[in-house]
Amino acid sequence: MIDLRTVETAIPGTQPDFHYPPYLSSIARSPRLPLVLLPETLTEKTGPVFGHGLIRLHDDDLTAQHGGDPIGERIFVHGRVLDEDGRPVRGALVEVWQANASGRYLHKVDIHDAPLDPHFSGAGRMITDDDGRYSFKTIKPGAYPWGNHSNAWRPAHIHFSLFGAGILSRLVTQMYFPGDPLQPLDPIFNSIPDEEARRRMISRLDMDRSEPNYALAYAWDIVLRGRSETPFVEARR
Amino acid sequence: MTEDSRLIPTGSQTVGPFFRIGLEYLIGRTPALDVDAAGRIEIRGRVLDRDGIPVPDAVLEFWAPHLTVSSSGPDQYPAGFRRTATDTHGNFSVAAMRPAAVPLENGRMQAPHMLVLVFARGLLRHLLTRVYFEDEPGNMADAVLQEIPAERRATLIARLENSYQWDVHLQGPNETVFFAW
């Protein structure tokens, strides 16, 4: 055996199984042979760093990208990206995409009979600041039907893609909204066995950051895999 | 910090079928490599499901750390990183600089390889694998490859034709070796 530490595996229940039959698409697309332990080498301990040069005007304002106001409920979304020690993940690239207020994606394979919005394409990106914070303005996405089972509807969600300190911190997930009755019916949401872990995918209404007479705000913190190897050199907290 | 105060990483969810909206821009912004550039390699392949059906909605991300040595400044595109997506026939291709051998901590070298992350509709968590290159003499001695059952090892090695050919089998008799995370 290789005398190196292997890549740590998730705490049981806190991540979805690869093979989760209630989500039909997973049945023929998920591995069935045993996963192999991988030593943590230089390849695994490093990862890409994206600079601010990647970010363009209005990448953090999905309501201002197409020359007019999109239809729907304007919202702010913000939060912090943290590592497993609770330290901010700085300079992390956060990519988001979502359906419009009618529950329709601007994508050729979305055949849901709901209107597209010429003022909304539903994509954004940002880089976290020194406190690990991100924020953007958007439209609250609508629920939409999908073909998984009879009368299947996805709860409203925003897709998130994140890069952390190393490639193993990589995370693609979905942010949900509080009080959405579709969540308990959704096999993608329910693919995470642990109830607390599911709950942590739900944002919270944040009245402190809401703007009176303008828009509500939702807060959602994200924890990426990985921890600082040198716990006491944190300089800026 | 004590173990008790450790935060639990946020759960993964599928990239879904509409990821191009949010992820495709980066493919277009990857600096092009001159076709004749020394050390340029191209990896082509398909992503296939249990039944050999091409997967037209997969994203692959390739990472090789040593390449970032040549990138400088905070606004540079990370040279060791490539993102690509499959087309309607499940085909992908990616051009990159040939990775160098990278050290193991115990002084041995690893054969040149790239770490590969696979995202797709149907994958609730992304998959982690590696691609090696069949014309690299170091493969036989590579510590990671050696740990993989011999009959599955070939799933991680790209064949050299005009370009490197490497298919990803998500499931089935030729299932690619994926690593635990």
Image (cartoon, rainbow, N blue to C red):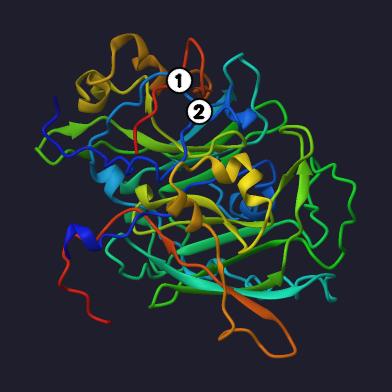
Nearer to me, A110 or B23: A110
Where does the image place residue A136, in percent across and percent down from the top left?
61, 73
Residue at image coords 28%, 13%: B149
Q: Quadrant of the N terminus of chain B?
A: bottom left
> In the image, A236: left or right of A155?
left
Return the residue at label 1.
A32
Quadrant of residue A132 in the image?
bottom left
The subunit letter for the residue under badge 1 reads: A
- Mark 2 residue crowding within 10 angstroms, few (<14) / some (14–19) / many (20+): many
Three-letter amino acid code at the position of disc 1: Arg
Return the residue at label 2.
A19
Where does the image place residue B25, in percent across and percent down from the top left?
64, 55
Q: Are marks 1 and 2 in contact (CB under 8 Å)?
A: yes
> In the image, B39: left or right of B51?
left
Where does the image place residue A16, in percent across and percent down from the top left?
47, 39
Q: Is residue A181 above or below residue A37?
A: below
Total tally of numbered discs in the picture: 2
In the picture, the disc for residue A20 is none
Q: Quadrant of the C terminus of chain B?
A: top left
> In the image, B85: left or right of B165?
right
The subunit letter for the residue under badge 2 reads: A
